[in-house]
Image: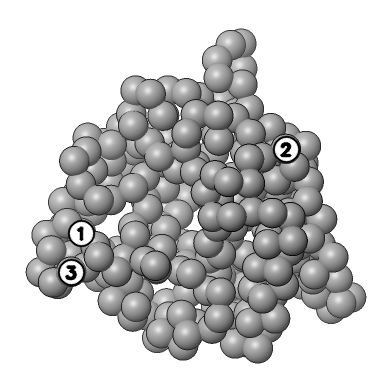
Amino acid sequence: MKKIFAANWKLNKTPEQAREFVIQFKNEAFKHADFFKTCEVILFPQAFGLEAVSSLCAGTEIGFGPQNIYFEKSGAFTGENSAEVASVALKAKFALIGHSERREIFKEIDGQLNKKNILVQSLKMTSVFCIGESLQQREAFQTLPVCFAQLDAGLAGLDQNVRVIVAYEPVWAIGTGKVATLEQVAEVHQAINDKLEARGFKSFQILYGGSVKADNAASLLKVPHVDGFLIGGASLEVSSFLNVCLAN
């Protein structure tokens, strides 16, 4: 199975910078034989760059989608992003749901995230659904209960036969330079795998996110049930993102 390399650009890149990235990335990736036979690449630009990415990824093996969508297709919801527009008009196949910044800064709660996952699945898109614990929760030995509660609530009512991607991101490791130890990653990914299997999900992958870089990617990819990465800072430059992909 291909490893997944998902780039979360957060609130970075103009549409022109997004275009430049995709053009350069395609040129560099195709220099490596069979790159897309072993790597599945997904780009999550900010909303203003989504159309630019869509136009340049059309007809390629590079996936893309919005960083956030609302749980209604359309209507009087000023400032929100339509998953239906992303899917139907822009041909997006993925949506990033439940990132810790959405949970913490924008106060998104489990019920809202569940509605988003259900809508995304109804549109034949694939959720990249983020879960993870804070440093306080980890130090209180609440990592697995927190992750399981987020999984149970966020994935309730989904068709277990349809693909879903779960991204485990320990909140204390996002953008801090700290990385969970291989043992910590192995424990949580094994537990998430077992939880999803017990819930009847047939097609899923589990990503790790949190200060992933080229120098730690290879060792993390060897951990059982690490099926790829959700990458923040290291995805902003083609060279650093490509080097993470090539660690596969």
Viewer-side label of 1, 2: 2
Q: Is residue 52 visible?
A: yes
Q: What whole-number distance in Å separates the C-alpha atoms at marks 2 and 3? A: 37 Å
Is disc 2 in contact with disc 3, using a CB cutoff of under 8 Å?
no
Q: Which of the pair 235/33 is nearer the observer? A: 33
Badge number at residue 157: 2
Q: Which of the pair 25/197 is nearer the observer? A: 197
| Rendering quarter of residue 231 | bottom left
Q: Which residue has dot 3 on it?
A: 34
Q: What whole-number distance in Å separates the C-alpha atoms at marks 1 and 2? A: 37 Å
Q: What whole-number distance in Å separates the C-alpha atoms at marks 1 and 3? A: 15 Å
Rendered residue at 52%/49% (across/down)? 163
Residue that protrudes farthest toward the top in the picture: 76
Q: Which residue has dot 1 on it?
A: 25
For label 1, the SS is helix
Q: Residue 233 in the image: x percent, y percent?
A: 44, 65
Against 47, is 149 above or below? below
Which color scheme does this rendered protein use? one colour
Is disc 1 in contact with disc 3, using a CB cutoff of under 8 Å?
no
